[in-house]
Image (spheres, rainbow, N blue to C red):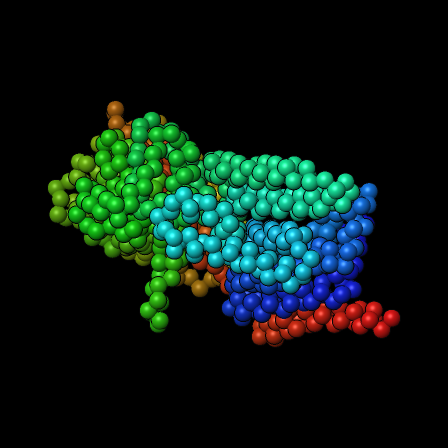
Amino acid sequence: MIAIYKRELKSYFCSFLGCLFIGVMLFLMGIYFSVYNLFMGYPYIGYALSSIVFLFLVGIPILSMRILAEERHQKTDQLILTAPVGVGSIVIGKFLALATIFAIPAGIISIYPLILSLFGTIAFGETYVAVLGFFLYGLACIAIGVFVSSLTESQVIAAVITFGVLFLGYVMSGICNMISTTGNLLTKILSAFDMVSRFDTFLNGSLQMTGVVYFVSVILLFLVLTVQSIQKRRYQVSVRNFSMSTYSVAVVLISTAAVVLVNVLAGELPLRFTSFDVTSNRLYSLTDETKEMVSSLEEDVRLYVLANEKQADATLDAALKKYADLNAHIKVSYVDPAVNPKFFTKYTDSDLSFNSIIAESSKRYKVIDYSSIYQTQIDYYTYSSTVTGYDGEGQLTSAIAYVTSDDMPKMYLLEGHGEAVFDAEFTAAIEKENVTYETINLLNYDSVPEDASCVIVYAPLSDFSDDDTEKMLTYMENGGNVFLITAYTENDMTNFNKLLAFYDVEVTKGLVIEGDANCFYQSPFFLLPQIAYHEITESAYNSGTYVFVPYAQGLTVHENEAVSASILLDTSDDSYARNDMESSAGYEKQDTDQPGPFAVGAACEKVIGDKQSNGVIYTSADLFTRDADAMVAGTNLKLFTSTIGSFANHTVSVSIPVKSYEISTLTMSQNVIFLLALFTVLVLPAAFLISGFVIWLRRRKR
């Protein structure tokens, strides 16, 4: 086999064909690499790879047409057929020679992401899964080309037939859709030849083992077919007997059946064994919160998808299968609107989009319109809409929790004291925790509503009235819960501070300055506090990132027999509070500054007779904002949802944040772009083409 491999590899480089293939592939890759990755700044190389797979339709047939057909045409195959060498070794040697030629440009392309990483963040998992899919697709095409070349002695015929077979694999998805949009037996059979759709699964950031099994089985099958094609002729040459035909047919049938069976079994395995999320933000994985909540279900939940299963959203379909794999109580059913157009009218009077979902249990149901699955952003310059995030898991987990919950908590957001307003991401998190909320002004109420699971006070800038303070304290003394967020203000906040004093907590008048450079970001006022382990901070603690707390006041927490407190976030020993914010002093500690450390987040419990009031306090008005959350990749939002969940008596948070599709583009100068484009489009391909031409010319002159 080694001798065959070396002979074939040498012949391809001596004939200029190998260098031509490598040069052309690098040239085309260089063009798309320059456009997508250099000029447009995309950090994913999959865009360029998907754009050059059409090269396989022409390049692979030309590369493989002579591998066996020329041997047969020149009659040199007689020497191989009668030699004491296994046919399998011959085929594998020739296949590996072609695979090596293809591996050279694929290997060079694999270096491109490393170069791009010098200019920004590269998702290496997604990138190299795309390269793997590209390589496997190419090897499968080569195996087909080798088999076709074994059937004829004409290189032209071998190239044309190979092109035809690869072209069918390239357009088979469209052919199947033309035959039937809903799918039937014929399209299921024809889809076995759909190679591009299998390749596409490698481009979405998910390593699909079914795709790997498909391409590997195609490679092995066509190598077996090639062996049988040669073996039949070899046997005829040596013994002049046609009894080999029966054996060859049996081997072909058994091999084909084995390949079909392996692929069917791979497709039936649970997704947790066949699908591996390699995206940097775990876009296609279910979070631990979802797994814990769904795994503990003890009642049936039916998820109706308003779509034909064949035309369903692929990402959503994969997520639904993962939910069903977690618990047998989750039942997924597809309802084709074309067959049953009025199905959804039992649940809502509104029109629902294709791929919308209805979650139903014995208690209640919830409708998830498809428009809420993906987060979009409108560019008002072009009036085009761009998908910026995926919220499939967030919506599904929330819906399942909603239809199985025994009670539905309600929270009230106070207004009337200059309170801040939560950004949309945070109000959405409250809704996904299956908490109903209402904004109220205590001026219009005799007392805090009795159905309040919690009252949220978000960064008031003016003090409470005596009346409002009395209503809040009465509510808390009767076991009411509060979620308090303080804000720095020069206004007197005596009455508001009485709410903090209820839990024996004091707040500094000024802001905390962090003296430890490891505990702030850019400015000593931008705190990165230590996260203490607690059921509220568990998701933030386990995230491995920081909570970003800008412009925070400090809490001094006391404990007594009636009050127990847990610090959630605290500053370092080098921190201090500057009460006189009008001072012109810099960040250096002054004699009038109050020494730390301080809590900037705390959870308190106070027992009043047979009742217990819970309060969670944070000291930054900017903590739960979109901008602060973006600084730490969503950790602040995780802390917020866990806090809300603790008041809703959720042992596990059911509010899963939107998973962002947005990517940071690469940043490089025009000179760097020009030099890299010049190298990848011209210099590198030209180097192979010139080298191949020189080698070919020297051999011709001999």
Residue under the image location 49 percent in, 51 percent down: 194
Residue 227 in sight from this viewpoint: no
Residue 141 in sight from this viewpoint: yes
**Picture coordinates of residue 303 (x, y %)?**
31, 38
| Pick the front one: 328 or 231 | 231
| Pick the front one: 120 or 579 | 120
| Image quadrant in which you'd find residue 138 | bottom right
**Picture coordinates of residue 409 (x, y %)?**
25, 37
Residue under the image location 42 percent in, 33 percent down: 326
Seen as rendered, the residue at the extreme right is: 702
Q: Quadrant of the C terminus?
A: bottom right
Count of numbered badges drawn on the protein? 0
Residue under the image location 78 percent in, 42 percent down: 238
**Picture coordinates of residue 396 (x, y %)?**
34, 42
Residue under the image location 66 percent in, 71 percent down: 679
| Pick the front one: 455 or 13 | 13
**Picture coordinates of residue 462 (x, y %)?**
25, 54
Q: Is residue 586 above or below residue 211?
A: below
Tell me: 410 left or right of 548: left
| Pick the front one: 36 or 153 | 153
